[in-house]
Amino acid sequence: MGGMAGSRGLERLTAQDLLMLWADDFGWSEDIGVLAVLDGARLLDGDGRVRVDEVRRRLEPRLHLVPRLRQLLCRPRWGLGWPLWVDAASFDLADHVRVHPLAPPGDEAQLLAACAELYRRRLNPARPLWEAWLLPGLPGRRVGLFLRAHHTLADGVAGMAAFGALLDLGADPPVPVAPAWAPAPPPSTGDLLRDNLRRRLRGLGRGLSALGRAGGPRGASLGVWREFLAERAPRTSLNRPIGADRRLAVVRGRLEVARQVAHAHRAKVNDVVLAAVAGGLRQLLAGRGEDVRELALRVMVPVSLHREQPGRASGNRDAVMLVPLPLGEPDPVRRLELIAAETAARKGRARPPMGGGLFGLVAVQRAWYRLLARQRTVNLVVTNVPGPPVPLYLAGARLLELFPVAAIMGNLTLAVAVLSYAGQLNLTAIADRDTCPDLEVFVQGMQAALDDLERSVCHTEAMRWNLLLR
């Protein structure tokens, strides 16, 4: 999420960043974010009000670490090239860090409902595309924090890097002095025109060069397209055109337990997550009266291509992997083993960025969005992002829990986002309110599947000890 500097030229959106922009034009939100629960003992005054000025004071000196937070997304007129980032002429942190008290009784259901309500409000394009809401009113003087940003700023990995840059590793670190900030002037029409011409010429040169090479990135891109389009996703109630309202639900897990389950069954933690999702989907669709006996759903799993040092990732750099989830298998352990075998076989394939190949063309990107409400390629998306392994603090308040929030669009009525944090492995289900009113059934099924897998490890360990003691 680097900043704009005149010496570095214009900062255009990349092809993959651009892919995240068009959803707005078709009526779907592409905002992503995190929901945190904080220990509010040092955030609240005696009347339970948030010391929001203190929070802003602690955040202000860190804004230079994430320059996008003070930049606007500029969409030039036709002929002047792709959208780009420009510094906001003025910036007031109070426009972005605000308070939204929870309605009584202030329980978890109210917190999730408040986040869904805030998510529905579109970000103001005349301001930098992010906001943070502090939500007091939870029991025990805890405070919610809902931070969201438009997907053009960052993907999940880069977003967590930016989030971490704004927070502290301890409760009482020294407050740094905020460096002076002055917005760079926006580029002129001539600057945009010349930059666009240079980029088009470079793109033409790369295209001609690629024609002379067999295979390579172009061949990998075509291979991914063949994998993507080779099969159609089964028809289920998961794929219906969605509206603008969302519902959120969470499942809490422990990272070490997931690792133990994965190790016991020669799998990865992400396989355990997918197995839990499969258990939830099996219960959800069976509860809707749908036949799951031979059903295998197609799930899209983003794969991070970031190669930066941890905490320094920027922009959008994802590929995708399609994984079949065998809902027809009733045994949770066998489901995990089948999923682990599928992901192991698919991980070795070359995967160019989502904005590569044909998807680097604006016309193709927009055509894809036009078809998204009727697509038959995937049934849902499951994304898993590694978060901070140690506790973080905001203005002296410890983040007790952290949950990811992802976007849904088209006819994807349900998505699952997963985030590890300080030993936690937390899952958030994001659903369209109208087409997925039974979200709790799915969440209960995920929790039951996780419990079954944990018990399988305990059973295996008990059998091993019995054999050793004989």
Image: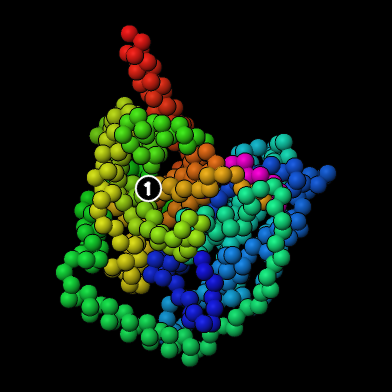
Q: Where's the C terminus, which quadrant?
A: top left
Side of 411 relative to 49 (left or right): left
Q: Is residue 337 visible?
A: yes
What residue is rendered at 44% in x and 72% in y? 13
Residue 428: x and y in percent read: 50, 43
Between residues 363 and 396, which one lies in front from this camera angle?
A: 396
Between residues 18 and 14, which one lies in front from this camera angle?
A: 14
Range covered by the magenta-colored residues: 395-404
12 above or below 263? below
322 above or below 201? above
**Tag count:** 1
- Helix, strand or loop status at disc 1: strand
Residue 30: x and y in percent read: 48, 59
Residue at the outermost bottom position: 190
Q: Say which residue label 1 marks.
A: 380
Residue 223: x and y in percent read: 21, 59
Side of 181 relative to 160 (left or right): right
Q: How is the image coloured?
A: rainbow
Side of 46 relative to 257 (left or right): right
Is residue 398 in the magenta section?
yes
What residue is rendered at 69% in x and 73% in y? 180
Residue at the outermost top position: 470
Is residue 74 in the magenta section?
no
Secondary structure character of the magenta stretch overall: strand
Between residues 440 and 140, which one lies in front from this camera angle?
A: 140
Q: Is residue 286 visible?
A: no
442 above or below 458? below
What residue is rendered at 72% in x and 58% in y? 175
What residue is rendered at 63% in x and 54% in y? 167
Q: Specify the quadrant of the image occupied by residue 37.
A: top right
Residue type for callout 1:
Leu
